[in-house]
Image (cartoon, rainbow, N blue to C red):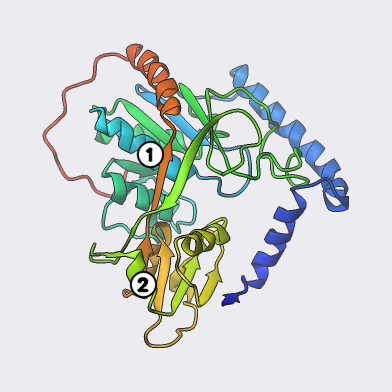
Amino acid sequence: MADTPPPPSDHGQAFLLRQWQRRGWVPRLLWPVSAVLGGLVALRRGLYRRGWLRSERVPAVVLVVGNVVAGGAGKTPTVLAVVERLRQQGLAVGVVSRGHGRHTRDCREVQAHSLATEVGDEPLLIQRRTGAPVFVARRRAEAARALLAAYPATRVIVCDDGLQHLALQRDIELCVFDDRGVGNGWLQPAGPLREAWPRPVDLVLHTGEQPAFAGYRAQRRLAAQAVNRLGEQRPLASLRGHPLHALAGIAQPNRFFDMLRAAGLPLARCTALPDHHDFGQGLPPAGAPEELWLCTEKDAHKLWPHWPQAWAVPLVFEPEPAFWADLQPRLAAALSSLPPAPPSPSPTPHGQQTS
């Protein structure tokens, strides 16, 4: 099997991620910088707590899904699971996000026909998978206002990756961890932490196989079917007779490759790309004519315009029942404090742009 090395700019990031798992000489060298930045983080939080920096309350329950560790820990699968669960319960749910990786800077609604370069790959995946209203903006409070203006019956807003976005007040905080835990326990750049841990949150969800501390667990596995751009499905087992090229532009691409191998797929090539990779900037070289390209669901919507024959392998993500049992009363208590929902207006088309 041939693994395509990551771009040169990604080598430094991979090196730092390894260093963050222990307290070696590199983290110790960077620790004074972490101490200064940690003081600034604490100062900022104190200014919000005292009201010297404005924090906005919106007329909906705000449930934040985030993490304190840099890099992907499973936030997007968690957002998808929460949104789908709440919608199954009949709740009107919307999502706000900053839209990392997009080339725009305004506040806009994510449409099914939106481009990832306009709204970000993760918000686009969330909208297409769930059908829930999704808005992106540099300030999530602005996105929440725009969402409620367009969909006033919304009762719950799930904030994607907003744990440190203190300008938007929240009712429930959910912190996600993977097998890295808190690494060496130091703040960036000496460690992986965005802010000090432990810190108060309502729920902790572990998406890895070996939780480092108490919290609920979620199972991750690949779906049994791959999906193409037309929505056609194909069993993973039927792919074994082809040379397979797996590629992933996510925070931890090797996790995707390992899951494919665990599903019994022999991979001829693996291409690890930076998180939020823009396939419009170039594609990996093609292999044999019979080679099949496999990608994550997050990458698929960016890859298909340039390589329409690629197959996406969705992730199945299932938090344990005890997690939902803990979330439900917290959500019910927060919902009980809201004023009655206004009647839903007749459906009207909404443009992408909001003012």
Q: Is residue 46 left or right of residue 105?
A: right
- Residue that protrudes farthest toward the left in the picture: 346
Q: Earlier in the sequence, mark 2 or mark 1?
A: 1
Regarding mark 1 in the picture, which secondary structure is present there?
helix
Q: Position of residue 353 (x, y in %)?
A: 31, 48
Local packing at callout 2 (Cα closer than 10 Å; few below 14, some 14-19, many 20+) is some
The CA span between labels 2 and 1 is: 28 Å
Q: Is residue 210 left or right of residue 187?
A: left
**Which residue position is annotated with label 1?**
81
- Image quadrant assignment for residue 90: top left
Q: Label 1 amino acid?
A: Ala
**Which residue position is annotated with label 2?**
239
Image quadrant where one finds the N terminus: bottom right
Q: Position of residue 325 (x, y in %)?
A: 40, 22
Q: Position of residue 232 (x, y in %)?
A: 23, 64
The residue sitting at 29% across, 40% down in the picture is 133
Q: Position of residue 246 (x, y in %)?
A: 47, 70
